[in-house]
Amino acid sequence: MDIYEKMHGGALYLSDDKDLLKEQAAYLEKLYDYNSTRPSESERRAELLKDMFAEIGEGCYIEPPFHANWGGKNVHFGNYVYANFSLTLVDDTHIYVGDNTMFGPNVTVATAGHPILPELREKAYQYNFPIHIGKNCWIGAGAIILPGVTIGDNTVIGAGSVVTKDIPANVVAVGNPCRVLRPIGDYDREYYFKNKRIEDTEI
């Protein structure tokens, strides 16, 4: 099993492989360029994201600063994905995000982990498991999504949540560890925030 098979297959591996570090450094240079763009350079930002990401759809926008272990090399965004300030993608393996999903500020999506056993951590072993986030999700500010998690379509993850296990579609989920609070339903078709009603013209 070569280093890439280990990276993307959930095996323990050492990330200090010389060829691996050389490739990673090239992507981090692109990330540096992205974070150095001016607010007026929206076209350049879009071009850079196409060069940085494994896949990126139409109309995606990431507000700098943006952080990623591999500069987006293993990230797959659908169309019209939006991320507010300080999105962190630990993209040592693949991260998939569906159309129209939104990230609040300071969200972390981490595919990588380290063994509990101290002797293995001392040698700097790590493992990676992919993350899947569905279409039309809203990931609230400061949420943390951990390796191997899948989040279903339309789901809202509350601010500050730590998502350690899969979350189904069409629910509101909150907390540490993150748990389903309730399904999205009739109440949400009538109110958008507390007692604030949705006008017919807004749907």
Image: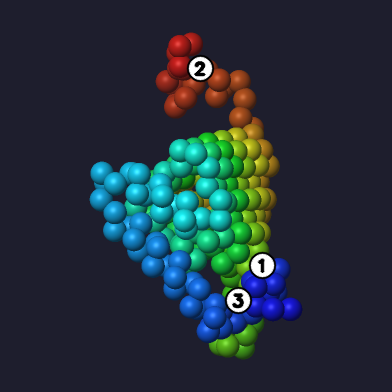
Question: Residue at horizontal 64%, vertical 59%?
Answer: 130
Q: Is residue 28 above or below residue 35?
A: below
What residue is shown with label 3? 126
Q: Position of residue 189 (x, y in %)?
A: 55, 20
| Amino acid at the residue labelled 2 | Ile
What residue is shown with label 1? 8
Marks 1 and 3, the one that precedes in the sequence: 1
State the CA–CA distance, disc 3 to disc 2: 46 Å
Q: Position of residue 184 (x, y in %)?
A: 61, 30
Question: Residue at horizontal 35%, vertical 49%?
Answer: 44
What residue is shown with label 2? 203
Marks 2 and 1, the one that precedes in the sequence: 1
Marks 3 and 2, the one that precedes in the sequence: 3
Location of residue 194 (image quadrant): top left
Q: For the image shown, how many numbered marks are present on the structure?
A: 3
SS for callout 3? strand
